[in-house]
Image (cartoon, rainbow, N blue to C red):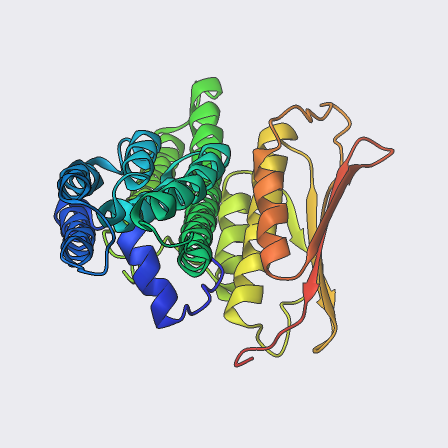
Amino acid sequence: MGAVAVQPWWERTLLALELGGGGRRRDRLVDLALFLYAAFAAGSIATNRQLHAGDTMQMVNVALAVPACLAIWVRRRHPVGVGWLAVGLSAFSSSAVHAGMVAVFSAAIHARPRRAVEIVAGAIVATAVDCAIYTGEKAFNDGFFTAWSAITVAAFCLGSFVRVRRELRHREIHEAQLAERTRIAREMHDVLAHRISLLSVHAGALEFNRGASPEEVARGLGVIRSNARAAQEELRDVIGVLRSESPDDPVQPPQPTLADLGRLIEESRAAGMDVTLVSPLPRPPLSTLAGRTVYRVVQEALTNARKHAPGQPVSVSIAGEPGGTLEVEVVNRPSADRPPDHAGSGAGLIGLAERLALAGGTLEHARLADGGFRLVARLPWTASGY
C-alpha cells in the first residue's frame, strides 16, 4: 500500500466537513454551523438601516430569508432543489444571499457539475435583480454586484475543489482496498496451494496403492494429517488479517524465508517428487523480502510441477552476485511414460509475477521443446540488513 501524502490543515478541515465517515452527528453539526451562519447573516442584513426598501419589501425580505435558511438542512439530499430555491429567493431578499452562497457551495460538491454551473449562473442573475430592487432611488450598485458575484464564483470553486479531492480520496481508498484484496488472495494461494497439492498426492497414493503395508498407510496418513494441520494454521493466520479491525494490526499471513527452502524441498521429495537443488543457497543471506520472494517462486514452481506434471524430475538453481541480479530457475523435465499436463488457470503465476514486481523483479515462463516447463525469476540481490 503506497504512502499517503500529508495534507495541510485547511484541506483536512474542508474534507472533514464534506466527506463521509463522520456519521450523522458530525453532519448535523456541520449543517447547524452553516444554518447559524446564514441565519446570523440574514439577521444582520435585515437590520441594516442603509438597506433601501420600504416596510413591505422589508417584510418580504425577512420572510423569504426564512425558507432559504431552513433549506440548508436538506442540502445534502437535494442539492439542486435547495440551490435553486435559495438562489431564487435571494433575488428578492438580500437577507437570503448568504444562504444562496451556502447552497452554491453545496451544489458544487453534491450535484452534477452542469447543474452546479447553472445554479451559479442563476445566482449571479439573482444578485443583479437584488441590487436593482434594494438600491432604491440610487443608481445600480456596481461594486456590490461585482463583489458578491466574485464571492459566489469563489464558493463554487471551493466546492468544486472539495468535490475533486473527495473523488480522488475515494479512488485512493478504492485502489488501496483492491491492492489489499489482491495481496490477501496472493497470500492465500501461496500458503494453501502447496499444502493442498501435497494432500492430493498422498491421498492419491493411498487410493491407488491398495496393497500398501500398514506401515506405509500409517506414514501416508501421518503426512496427510501434518499437512492438513499446517494448512489449517496458515489459513487461520490469513483469516486473522481479514478480521483485523486496525490497519496497524501486526497480524500477518505466514511469511517464510530462504531458510525454509530446504524444508520445502524435503516436503516435496517426501511426496514422491524428484527435486534437485543444483546450486547452494545464496551467501551472504538475502534480505527478508528477497528471501521470501525466492521461497514463493520455488514453492509455486514445485506446486505447479506436482499438479500439472506429476512424476517428472525438477531442478532448482539459484545464482547471482551480491549487489547484482539474483536469478531463480526451476525446470521440470518430461518423463518417458507420462505426457505433461499444462492445463491450469494461471492464477498462481499471475500472483507470482505481482509479488516479483513488488520486489523489483521480473518473471519469465515457457514450455520447452521436449515438453518440459521452465520458470525464471530475476530480482535485485539485496543482502540482509539492506
Query: Farthest front residue?
Result: 137
Considering depth in this image, is 372 or 154 the residue closer to the camera? 154
Considering depth in this image, is 329 or 151 the residue closer to the camera? 151
Name the image quarter holding residue 325: bottom right
Asked if 162 appears above or below 178 in the picture, the reply is below
Q: Is residue 19 visible?
A: no
Q: Position of residue 171 (x, y in %)?
A: 47, 46
Q: Position of residue 331 (x, y in %)?
A: 73, 45
Asked if 206 appears above or below 122 in the picture, the reply is above
- As drawn, is 345 to the left or to the right of 221? right
Q: Position of residue 363 (x, y in %)?
A: 70, 49
Which residue shows up at 65% across the image and 62% down it?
360
Q: Position of residue 160 (x, y in %)?
A: 45, 49
Asked if 344 appears above or below 131 in the picture, the reply is above
- As drawn, is 219 to the left or to the right of 269? left
Considering depth in this image, is 67 or 63 the residue closer to the camera? 63
Which residue shows up at 27% across the image and 36% down it?
89
Name the image quarter holding residue 317: bottom right
Name the image quarter holding residue 87: top left
Labels in figure, total: 0
- As drawn, is 378 to the left or to the right of 181? right
Quadrant location of the C terminus?
bottom right
Q: Is residue 172 visible?
A: yes
Which residue shows up at 29% across the image and 44% down it?
239
Considering depth in this image, is 373 or 4 the residue closer to the camera? 4
